[in-house]
Amino acid sequence: MCGLTGFLSAPGAVDDAEAIRRLEAMTSAIRRRGPDASGHWHDPEAGIGLGHRRLSILDLSAAGAQPMPSRSGRYVLAFNGEIYNHLELRARLEAEGLAPDWRGHSDTETLCAGFEAWGIEKTVCCAIGMFAFASWDRKVRLLTLARDRMGEKPLAYGWQGAGADAAFLFGSDLGALRAHPACLREIDRDALVHFMRHSCLGGELSIYRGVRKVPPGAMVEVSLEDRTPRVRRYWSVAGAIAGTRDTPQVSEAERVDALDDLLRDAVRRQMLSDVPVGAFLSGGVDSSLVVALMQEFSDRPVRTFAIGFHSQRYDEAGYAAAVAAHLGTDHTELYVGERELLEVVPRLPEIFDEPFADGSQVPTVLVSKLARESVTVSLSGDGGDELFAGYDRYRQGAGLARWMHRVPLPLRALAAGGVRAAPPRLLSRAFDPFLSVAEGKEPNGQRLRRLADYLRSGSSRELHRKLVSRWRFPEQVVLDAREPDGVLTEPDAAFDRLEDAELMMALDLGAYLPDDILAKVDRASMSVSLESRAPLLDHRVVEFALDLPLEMKLRGGISKWALRQVLYRRVPQNLIERPKMGFEAPVAEWLRGPLREWAATLLSSERLRREGFLDPVVIERKWGEHLSGNWNWGMQLWNVVMFQSWLEAERAGI
């Protein structure tokens, strides 16, 4: 795992020495992604510069150093990620008589050889892995940026500056772009609206105006002759769905066997490393399965790591310990207390580089730090929920959607209006004897008002958008802005044939997974120079899962049915079967407790008015209601304090 950055500007705009100084500044900003070495390459005649930070995983020798030229020198590559089938690609190149005299055994060198032999796009389509890269074609003076299919590794880009000072900047983190003098750092208010809804900056959005993100499964090409970046998809969720459902009829048992074989191969490949490998373990289906498969390929106990909370509502450490004991792993756990919390929260703007507000970011940072003390690579179970119907919202959303399809919208809207007209405290008093409220969750009155809002949805897509929204009307929070369109609002014919639960899963695969879950894991793990790998996101597993009938994912109210069949061959069912908790954090309690003073400073009405981004009246009301205990606005306010904290750090230069 590494970090990459660079720029494209007018030839001769800066001399070679100044270009290298700029590249050094840009790579220094992402040092945590690659503490082992740095490299810089500049072609003054073309105006291109590439920078790289290296975290040595495969081929620890100098033969793996980057930026790396191809054999002929036509391509120069800065690469971040892992190509898990690169040895097979090497063998294919050799069989076709297209292999160079290998200098080492890194996957970067394999990619360079593939680019020369087959071209960039064909090589990428043959690759199994997670990656982001920048490749300069010296023959045609074309820069190509690319990102892996599922979006595990990030890459941002954009033209910044004006006139002779304009430069096309790119990098693994925005911090690399900020280090270049052309970066304008203009906050995009419209993108901030999206952030308030989703807790992250999704799709191609970044917090800066004019800076975009390479979409998952896409390539971006740009040159000085054609300055408009051309975005081209080589893989997409919609495309994968369009290619499914033509599988010959096979039995469920055969499908489970095929899934077992595929997962074993994915885990085996991702254990390839020249440095120590471990795994995150929560004790749930996904991580337990990954660890069980790892143990089958290891001749010693796998190192596993878990985070616990003193609040029983959020604590999964005991479940993880039970699975670890059964599998015989070398297990380590850390309980998160007030001290750990107060140490991490002030560092979140630096760690996540732009506004990010998934409450589980704190335990993710802590478990990454815990793992890094023993290993350099850690496998996770990320992707299982989106692929195999793990989230409760798929089951609940499908149930709501069925009801919506049967009852006309005017009748639903009338019923919803009646519920929302009732005072929330009155609703809570009426329903509390019958509906228990879990620790840290909304009061019943607030929950019923939210349910009423769901019932006013005009379609399954609209319902899903509400289910994944933090602020339902974020334009009311951000001043002088409008919400941009995104993945969740763009229709796609490939999704039309999907059942309601399948539609929601597909939308999450294209948005929530890369924009929230994978961004969280990437930033948290890279903050301690730990490489995180996700075997369930091997694109072959993804395509297999998309082809599975829904009843093999969600059956009788039980999620991940097919995955469970594979897991129960290795772990007793009684160690796994329990209500889903998810990797959550007690954000609402934190804001009323140990983080109250810190949050109050960030949410000060005077401060909000002075900064001019957020409406102080709306936020002051939510903050007061939250502190009263009659409402739970923890997640909504977490979005606000995470932006405010980031803004403070940005103004200070991060």
Image (cartoon, rainbow, N blue to C red):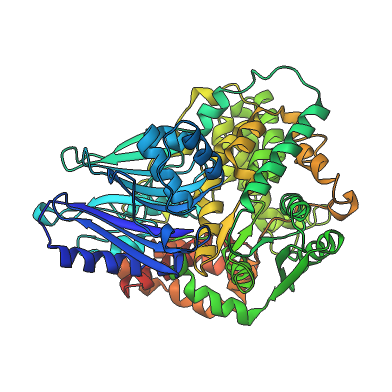
Q: Between residues 149 and 561, which one lies in front from this camera angle?
A: 149
Q: Between residues 121 and 350, which one lies in front from this camera angle?
A: 121
Residue depicted at 64% across the width and 37% down the height: 541
Whether 292 is drawn above or below 338: the answer is above
Q: In the rendered image, which quarter is residue 179 located in?
A: bottom left
**Residue 460 placement (x, y as % from top left):** 59, 31
Whether 88 is drawn above or below 252: the answer is below
Evaluate whether residue 631 shows in this view. Answer: yes
**Residue 42 placement (x, y as % from top left):** 22, 57
Residue depicted at 77% across the width and 55% down the height: 295
Q: Residue placed farthest to the bottom in the image?
A: 339
Evaluate whether residue 389 shows in this view. Answer: no
**Residue 157 placement (x, y as % from top left):** 31, 50
**Residue 247 placement (x, y as % from top left):** 67, 20
Residue depicted at 49% across the width and 49% down the height: 515
Question: How many numbered markers are drawn?
Answer: 0
Q: Is residue 644 left or right of residue 211?
A: right
Whether 554 is drawn above or below 193: the answer is above
Residue depicted at 28% across the width and 46% down the height: 73
Q: In the rendered image, which quarter is residue 525 located in?
A: bottom right
Q: Quadrant of the C terminus?
A: bottom left
